[in-house]
C-alpha cells in the first residue's frame, strides 16, 4: 500500500524543475507484490505535467531572486573525501564528499527557516554578485582562495553577513590541514585543534568492552556524538 502525496506536490516539483530551465522528467516504479508495476503514481505525475504545461511559458526568462547564496565548490567536493573507495561509479556519484553533504544541509536549513536561497558556484561569486544577497553560506568550503577571501572581507565590511560551517578555510589547495582558519579574522576566533574522540566508529555503535580477551585487538569505542569537534580559541571576538 502506497501513501501517495497530494497532486499539488507533484505539480510543485514539476514547476520547480521547469523554472530552472531544465527539461522536466520524473519516474515512478512502485510495484505490486507479484512484481507488476503500480501505475497510480505515474498517472499523478502525468496529471501534474498537463497542469504545469498550462503556465509553463511563465516559468522561463526570469531572474532568480534569493536572500541567501550557498557557495558550491568543485574543489572542496573532491578535496576531502572520508568514505572508502566505492567500486560502482553511480554509487560514488551519489555518495559525494563532505562538502556536498554540507551543501544539502544548508539547503534544508534555509528551507526550514523559510528563506529563499540559491546555490552559486564559487568562481561565479565575486564581490559585485555578493552584494545581491543578505547572507552567504560557506558549507565545508575546505579551501578558500585568496581572491575569494578578499571579496568576503569586503562584503562583511560593507554590512554583509556570512555563515561558515564545518572546516571552512582549514585546508590549503592540496588538502593539507592548516594551523589556522584562513578566515579567522572574520570569524573572530582561532583554530585550536580537531577532536575526533567521539566520532562515529566502525562498529556504528557504542560497545562496552570487558576484560575478556576477545577485546584484546579491538579499538576502544565511544558514544558516536559527531564526526568531529573543532576546538577554538578566543581571538578578539566581538558580540
Image (cartoon, grey):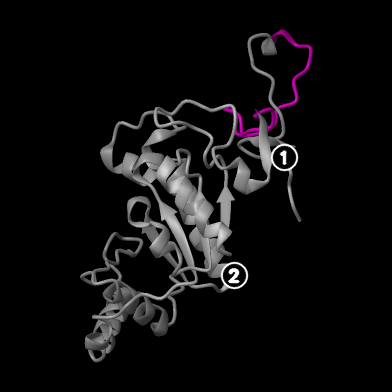
Above or below for 161 versus 7: above
Question: Is 77 left, or right, of 153 in this rendering?
Answer: left
Residue at screen point 69% across, 32% down: 198
The residues bearing labels 1 and 2 have C-alpha atoms spaced at a distance of: 30 Å
In the picture, residue 147 is in which quadrant?
top left
Disc on res. 235: 1
Above/below status of 4 relative to 189: below
**How far across and down, in percent of the image, does residue 175 sit?**
43, 29
Which of the numbered marks, if any, corresponds to residue 72? none
Q: Is residue 17 magenta?
A: no
- Residue 15 relative to residue 137: left or right: left
Q: Main secondary structure of the magenta part?
A: loop
User: In this image, 117 relative to 40: left or right?
Assistant: right
Q: Nearer the viewer, residue 194 or 65?
A: 65
> Which of the two labelled residues, at mark 1 and mark 2, occupies the earlier sequence position?
2
**What element does badge 1 sit on?**
loop
Which of the two residues, 212 or 10, is positioned nearer the viewer here? 10
So how many labels did they put on this image? 2
Q: What residue sits right under mark 2 in the picture?
A: 113
* Residue 82 visible in the displayed image: yes
Residue at image coords 61%, 34%: 200
Q: Residue at x 36, y 78 (%)?
A: 10
Counting from the top left corner in percent of width and height, residue 124 is at 33, 56
Amino acid at each position: 500500500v502506497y501513501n501517495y502525496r497530494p497532486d499539488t506536490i507533484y505539480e510543485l516539483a514539476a514547476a520547480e524543475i521547469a523554472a530552472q530551465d531544465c527539461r522536466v522528467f520524473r519516474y515512478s516504479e512502485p510495484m505490486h507484490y507479484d512484481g507488476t508495476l503500480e501505475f497510480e503514481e505515474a498517472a499523478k505525475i502525468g496529471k501534474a505535467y498537463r497542469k504545469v504545461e498550462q503556465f509553463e511559458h511563465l516559468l522561463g526568462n526570469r531572474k532568480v531572486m534569493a536572500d541567501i547564496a550557498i557557495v558550491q565548490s568543485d574543489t572542496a567536493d573532491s578535496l576531502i573525501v572520508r568514505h572508502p573507495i566505492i567500486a560502482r561509479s553511480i554509487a560514488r556519484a551519489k555518495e559525494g564528499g563532505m562538502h556536498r553533504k554540507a551543501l544539502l544541509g544548508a539547503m534544508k536549513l534555509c528551507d526550514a527557516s523559510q528563506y529563499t536561497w540559491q546555490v552559486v558556484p564559487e568562481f561565479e561569486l565575486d564581490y559585485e554578485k555578493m552584494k545581491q544577497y543578505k547572507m552567504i553560506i560557506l558549507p565545508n568550503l575546505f579551501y578558500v582562495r585568496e581572491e575569494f577571501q578578499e571579496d568576503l572581507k569586503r562584503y562583511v565590511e560593507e554590512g554583509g553577513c556570512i555563515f561558515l560551517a564545518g572546516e571552512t578555510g582549514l585546508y590549503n589547495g592540496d588538502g593539507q590541514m592548516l594551523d589556522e582558519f584562513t578566515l579567522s579574522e572574520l570569524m573572530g576566533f582561532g583554530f585550536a585543534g580537531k577532536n575526533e574522540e567521539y566520532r562515529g566508529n566502525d562498529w556504528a555503535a557504542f560497545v562496552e568492552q570487558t576484560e575478556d580477551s576477545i577485546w584484546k585487538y579491538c579499538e576502544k569505542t565511544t558514544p558516536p556524538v559527531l564526526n568531529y569537534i573543532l576546538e577554538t580559541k578566543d581571538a578578539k571576538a566581538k558580540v
